[in-house]
Amino acid sequence: MTIMADVEAGSALIGSDGDASFTGHLRRYGDLLHLSGDDVVEQAADSGLTGHGGAGFPLWRKLNAVREARGCPIVVANGAEGEPASAKDRWLLARRPHLVVDGLQLAARAVGAREAILYVNARTSLPLLENLLHERPRERARVELVVAPHAFIAGEESAVANALSGGAAVPRSKPPSVIERGVRNRPTLVSNVETLALLALICRRGAGWFRDVGTADQPGTMLFTVRGAVGRPGIVEAAHGAAVNDVLGLAGGATRALRAVLIGGYHGTWLTAAEAASARLSRSDLAVFGATPGAGVVVALADGICGLAEMSRVVSYLARESAGQCGPCLNGLPRLATLVRELATGIADRQTLPELQRICELVAGRGACHHPDGSVRFVRSGLRVFAEEIARHLQGRCSRTTDQIVLPT
Amino acid sequence: MSTSTATALWYLGRASGVVDLVLLTIVVGLGIATRSGRAMLGLPRFGVSAIHRSASLLALVFLGVHTASLTLDPQAQLRWIDAVIPFGSRFRPLWTGLGALAFDAVVALVVTSLLRHHIGRRVWRAIHWAAYAIWPFAVLHTLGDGTDASRAWLVGCVVVCALAMLALLGWRTSESYLDDTDRVAGTRLPANVIGRPR
Amino acid sequence: MSQHLRIDWTACDGRGLCAELLPELIRRDDWGFPVFSDAPVPVDLLDHARRAVDVCPTLALRLASPSHLTRTMQRTPDGAG
């Protein structure tokens, strides 16, 4: 499932060749750096590096905020990857774990932390990671390896902080943000593993090198998990702003005519095949569709797959994955799931669509985290993109030619 | 102090004690009614909450009268400290001590409730559970310490309060206690998010 | 400084006392949970808003000025573009 491809030869920043050991790492990237905290923040700012966990927040701002917060800071590399359709973080931890730890140490230096945590998905190879940590010399921050619970919400920033404080991996109400009071009420930097890996590269090669690729407001590259009707589903590295078609091409290209493309993940946005054909993967380019690159998931849905059936399974999954703390989410998502299921199984009536829109409106923005909002975005965009299919279903027909399942839950 | 003042204090102490027991029963009842989240007794929900708070302050006042009058009464031999620190009084230390415990709990509940916005939900709730302990302590204190404990009217009073309390607890623990027919109120976390990090 | 209604969703139990005391601004959704806008509370309703905050049995409702965290995050580092 893991293949890598360059946008153009040699422009992959992370790359996939070579071995993951410490010696391999040093051979490929050179010696470990000894930058000051200020230098790290400056590099982060100059490079314009933004978060790669979905939110896309500028890293230097987070670093500064944690630095300035009161208390003893701690840094967390977030590799929980609760999104079932995404595999890039696991891939990164298997192929370039030392780059991630380099980034973690640099971030620790930037904020003045002596403790760091590598928070990983339960499917990551733990013995491998533990060995790799032992390969490293004694560094500024002590790194602890922690397994995330197997839940969609487990990678949410405040859920990470809660879990690492000994509680459940469920989000907390903000304020205060995790930056001010996170793990055990200490100022906490939670950063996606890919962001940290890129930070490590930027500190070695310079901000300019990073800015050479990508767009002006989103420089650099991004890892995408490409699935569905493509020749070689897997992890692809492409510059920000790359065309959706190019990214699909890097994964072997579409194997048949497409109906729709899902961008971002299960909190992401559906695009029609026509829209996807002209779309580019950057925040500014996708904004016109109300979409963002999100966690980098790109799923090509072929013609002949019932989009509503896929949606129904995912929305039911999202409803089950509610942390169960907030009324609108706990009650609203199952209601959405029921309604979408009615559409998918052809027992819907005239009221179903307006009711769906009403519940979407009622649920979005009302919760301690963005699970309801993201789920609503997934539903709303799906209703738009699969409008023809909905009309068919309301007449008792379906354009499905296969029962193949595309989106994992 | 003249004998008549002393006698007045003595009667005041006993009377306010009995009244307080009845009031405490009512306060706990109103607290349970408030927690149920229902509008009742002809009042909207905020009204039920409001009379619970008012009644508890009234109960505190009567508790103050009860304690003060018995402390001031020379015959009762009650020192100020015995009202707060239990089991140290000269007269029936055990039963008076239970009264002191009830006193402490009432004060703790009232103070934490007044300061609830500063101490946070968790601490407030943890202490508020102690409300269920106040009533048994108060009843035992009444029966053990009360000079009218053998009198029919007092026993009748205690029995009525006890029956009311049993009914209230029965309601509190019943399936239909909360007004939850049209929704799920989130309290139980799904098992998969309660992970044990290594 | 304008005051806004804020809610701790993890604490809210949808009991609806706030909606009773501030029906002009708060209504309840299908499941009893409060719905209100992000707009500042009008001055003539501030007292009622404070009462609503006080009555909330789970301390979920708050009155707050616009988030101070947003302001911290907007500070630029020295020398960066």
Image (spheres, rainbow, N blue to C red):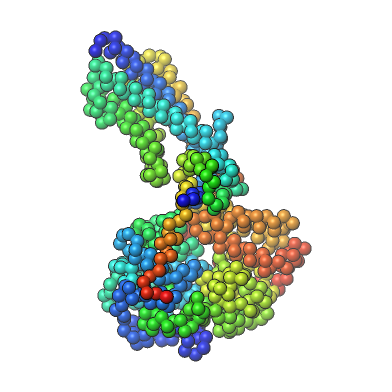
The x and y percentages for residue A170 are: 45, 57
Front-most of B170 and A256? Answer: A256
Q: Is residue B169 left or right of residue A407?
A: left
Front-most of A31 and B22? Answer: A31
| Residue A94 visible within the image | no
The x and y percentages for residue B108 are: 34, 35
Q: Is residue B97 left or right of residue A217?
A: left
Q: Quadrant of residue B89?
A: top left
Q: Quadrant of residue A271?
A: bottom right
Which residue lies at the image location 40% right of the left edge and 21% below the top edge?
B19
**Quadrant in which the C terminus of chain A is drawn:** bottom right
Which residue lies at the image location 50% right of the left edge and 75% below the top edge?
A217
The x and y percentages for residue A108 are: 33, 70
Q: Is residue A387 left or right of residue A76?
A: right
A190 to A23, vertically: above or below: above
The x and y percentages for residue C31 are: 59, 47
Q: Quadrant of residue B76?
A: top left
Q: Residue furthest bottom?
A: A9
Which residue lies at the image location 39% right of the left edge and 74% below the top edge?
C80
| Residue B7 visible within the image | yes
Please count the marks in the image: 0
Which residue lies at the image location 34% right of the left edge and 22% below the top edge?
B65
A336 to A89, vertically: above or below: above
Front-most of B57 and C24? Answer: C24
